[in-house]
Amino acid sequence: MQNDATSAVPRDPLALEEYGALRATIRQRGSLRFLVTTITFSAWAGVLITACTAMVTPVFTLISLVVLCAGFEVNLAIHVGVERVGRYLQLKYESEGQNAAHWERTSMALRVPSGGLDPLFSWVFASALLVNWLMGVWLSRDATSPEFPGFSTEGLVFVGLHAAVAIRWILASRFTRGQRERELRAFEQIHPPRS
C-alpha cells in the first residue's frame, strides 16, 4: 500500500519532472522575496541617509522613493508569479481524486481571520514610504519662509508622487487578495480540470 507522499506524485516521468520543477520554482521564489525585501530596505536606508546628510532639497529623497518602488514591484512580480504557478499546479495535478497532491488546494482553502502574513510586506513598505515623505518634508522646511513646507510647486510634486506610490501599493495589495480565485477560474477556462 502506498503512503500519501508517493500517491500524491504524478506517475508520468514528464509530469513528475514538471511537478518537481514547478514546486522548486515556488520554493525558490518564495525565499527570494525575503532577500529582495532585505536588499531593498538596506539600499533604501543608505540612499535616504545619504540624501538627508548630503543634499539640501527634498527632491533628492525621490531617489530613495525609486528604490522603494523598485523593491516593491520586484516583490509583487515574484509573488504574482508564484501564485500563478501554484494555480497551474492546483489545476493540473490536484484534482479531487484520492491520489492527487493537496498542497495548493489546501493552502488556497486556508483562511486566517486576522494576523495572517502579508506576502507583499505592505505595512513595512508603507512605513518606509511615510519615513521617506517625512524626511522630504524635514529637508524642505525653511525657518524664514512663512508658508508651510510642501505648498511650493516642488513640495506638491513631492507629496503627489508619494501619494501616487501609496495608491499603487494599495491597488496591488487588493489585486493579490483575490488573485488565487481569479486565476484558478482563468486557468479552468483555458484547461478544464482533469476528471
Image (tube, rainbow, N blue to C red):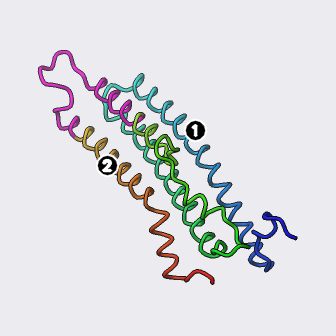
Percent from the top left, x then y, of residue 54?
A: 41, 24
Q: Is residue 171 found left or right of 18 in the rendered image?
A: left
Residue count near mark 1 (Cα–Cα under 10 Å), binned few <14, some 14–19, many ≥20: few
> The magenta stretch spans which residues?
128-156
Identify which residue is drawn at 70% across, 68% down.
Answer: 101
Q: Which residue in the rendered view is the most extreme toward the left? A: 146
Identify which residue is drawn at 13% across, 24% down.
Answer: 147
Question: Who is closer to the viewer here, 19 or 110?
Answer: 110
Q: Is residue 136 found left or right of 105 in the rendered image?
A: left
* Quadrant containing the N terminus in the rendered view: bottom right
Percent from the top left, x then y, of residue 99?
A: 74, 73
Q: For residue 142: magenta?
A: yes
| Residue underneath mark 2 | 167
Q: Does 59 appear above or below 78?
A: above
Residue count near mark 2 (Cα–Cα under 10 Å), binned few <14, some 14–19, many ≥20: few
**Which of the 4 quarters of the picture holds residue 4?**
bottom right
